[in-house]
Image: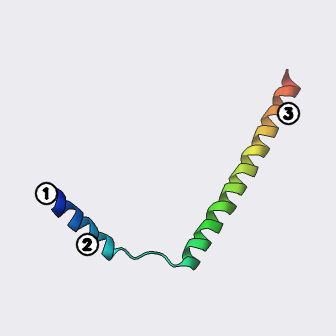
Amino acid sequence: MKIVSFFKECIAELKKVVWPSKDDVISSVKVVLISTVVVAVILGLLDLLFVTGMNLIF
């Protein structure tokens, strides 16, 4: 009986969810992709800087 009640409550809660629009999802994906590329470039440049510095020292 508790399982049936649990699933009924889950369905009721899911009906209350406000799902984002397609435009909201697309803009969020763009932000994530751009920020990922920017962070990757920054980390790549830092790695190159550190490797070059180590090669100059040793």
User: As drawn, is 54 to the left or to the right of 13?
Assistant: right
Quadrant of the rendered structure where residue 6 is?
Answer: bottom left
- Give the camera-side residue of 46 and 30: 30
Checking the image for residue 52, the label placed there is: 3
**Separation of residues labelled 2 and 1 (CA atoms):** 15 Å
Q: Which amino acid does label 3 sit on?
A: Thr
Residue 45: percent from left, percent from top: 79, 45
Q: Quadrant of the C terminus?
A: top right
Badge 2 is on which residue? 12
Label 2 crowd (10 A; few <14 / some 14-19 / many >=20): few
Checking the image for residue 22, the label placed there is: none
Residue drawn at 28 percent across, 69 percent down: 11
**Separation of residues labelled 2 and 3 (CA atoms):** 59 Å
Q: What residue type is labelled 1?
A: Lys
Sequence-wise, the earlier of marks 2 and 1 is: 1
Sequence-wise, the earlier of marks 2 and 3 is: 2
Look at the picture and state if 30 lies above or below 48. below
Q: What residue type is labelled 2?
A: Ala
- Give the camera-side residue of 35 and 1: 1
Secondary structure found at label 1: helix
Q: How is the image coloured?
A: rainbow
Checking the image for residue 2, the label placed there is: 1
Residue drawn at 56 percent across, 77 percent down: 22
User: As drawn, is 30 to the left or to the right of 10?
Assistant: right
Say whether marks 2 and 1 touch (CB < 8 Å): no
